[in-house]
Amino acid sequence: MFAYIRTMTSEHTHRASVRGIRRRWRAHRAWRLLVTGGIAALLAHGVVHAAGPARPPRVVVVRPGQTLWTLGRRYAPSGTDLRRWVFEVERLNGLHHADLVAGEAVRVPR
């Protein structure tokens, strides 16, 4: 009879220790999630402020003979891929081609 009680006590102690381990593990996971989320929020905050406010696009009036490619050589920042810059200008202005008409106002990114 005493062996049975001892076994029950041993099982109970084992279960209690498992519960304690699980509880600590849950607390550890929650703490890790909180720290990771805080770091992500700080990084996102820094990225947003580092980029600064978005500047509106510059408006350029097209001269005779100019194309998006010649505008790109003049107005795109150095080191920019002109293909991407031209695509962005087409997107900004709703163009479906790179042909321009003299006197047309075109928005170009800064």
Image: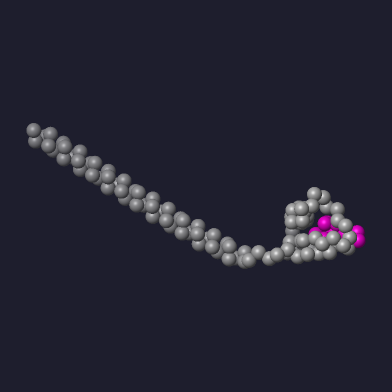
Classify residue 63 as left or right of residue 57.
right
Per the rendered image, the range of residues in magenta is: 64-73
Q: How is the image coloured?
A: one colour
Q: Residue at x 55, y 64 (%)?
A: 46
Q: Residue furthest right?
A: 64
In the image, taking residue 55 as reference, residue 42 lies left or right, namely left
Position of residue 80 measured from the top left corner of the image (x, y, whole percent): 74, 58
User: Percent position (x, y) of residue 90?
Assistant: 77, 54
- In the picture, the quarter occupied by the C terminus is bottom right
Q: Quadrant of residue 79?
A: bottom right
The quarter holding residue 75 reads bottom right
Q: Relative to residue 9, is residue 53 drawn left or right?
A: right
Name the residue nearer the viewer: 1 or 101: 101
Residue pictured at 77% horizontal, 56% vertical: 93
The quarter of the rendered structure image containing the N terminus is: top left
Residue 56 spot, x, y in % from top left: 70, 65
Residue 18 location, x and y as percent? Answer: 27, 43
Q: Nearer the viewer, residue 64 or 42?
A: 64
Residue at 25% in and 45% down: 17
